[in-house]
Amino acid sequence: MNSVFDKTAQVIAFAAMILGSSLSLAEQDAPETAGDADVTIEVEIRERKVLGDQVIRLTQGQIVKMIWKSDEETQVHIHGYEIHIPTSPEAPAEIMFEAHATGRYPVTSHGFGGEYGKMHEMLLYIEVYPK
């Protein structure tokens, strides 16, 4: 009976170690916002829709600066990268990140007009291609 408890404790400790390592690596890899971006992308949301392209294509390793403008308060979520960007009509929101993970990632709004979490509206996709 004691060995089952020991194995469970080992699995939990291992999982905590892996999760802790992942978080610290993500923090270390995040570029500083003072650096230069490889690409700058401006996205404008008007009447709860993105104006222009619905797909942003990037190459793995690019440092991306995104400038978000919105006619209404919302929180933009870049899924897969777990980036949350609060926006408001008063000032554009800027975010800088490295496109390290390849794939197709949805970008959604988590509520408009300050009602975060009420609705998840699809805004666009970010596609990151391997080098």
Image: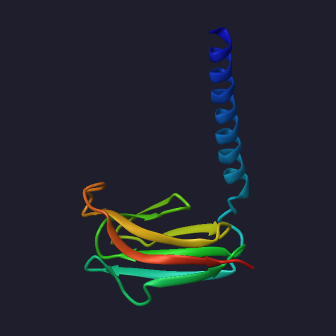
Q: Identify which residue is drawn at 60% across, 68% down.
A: 96
Q: Which one is nearer the viewer's eye here, 77 or 22?
A: 22
Q: Which one is nearer the viewer's eye here, 56 or 131?
A: 131
Q: Identify which residue is drawn at 69% across, 75% down.
A: 60
As drawn, 11 above or below 27? above
Apparent side of residue 90 relative to residue 62 in the rendered image (left or right): left
As drawn, 35 above or below 114? below
The answer to which quarter of the image holds residue 95 is: bottom right
> What's the image's color scheme?
rainbow
Q: Which one is nearer the viewer's eye here, 11 or 63?
A: 11
Task: Check the image and name the residue furthest to the bottom.
Answer: 52
Q: Identify which residue is drawn at 39% across, 68% down.
A: 108
Measuring from the top left, give residue 72's x and y in whole percent: 28, 71
The answer to which quarter of the image holds residue 6 is: top right
Task: Check the image and name the residue furthest to the top.
Answer: 2
Quadrant holding the C terminus: bottom right
Quadrant holding the N terminus: top right
Measuring from the top left, give residue 114's x and y in whole percent: 27, 58
As drawn, 117 above or below 11? below
Q: Identify which residue is drawn at 45% across, 81% down.
A: 43
Measuring from the top left, give residue 92's x and y in whole percent: 44, 73
Apparent side of residue 52 relative to residue 65 in the rendered image (left or right): left
Q: Which one is nearer the viewer's eye here, 101 or 78?
A: 101
Task: Check the image and name the residue furthest to the front.
Answer: 1
Apparent side of residue 118 relative to residue 57 in the rendered image (left or right): left
As drawn, 111 above or below 131? above
* Count of number-bearing discs: 0
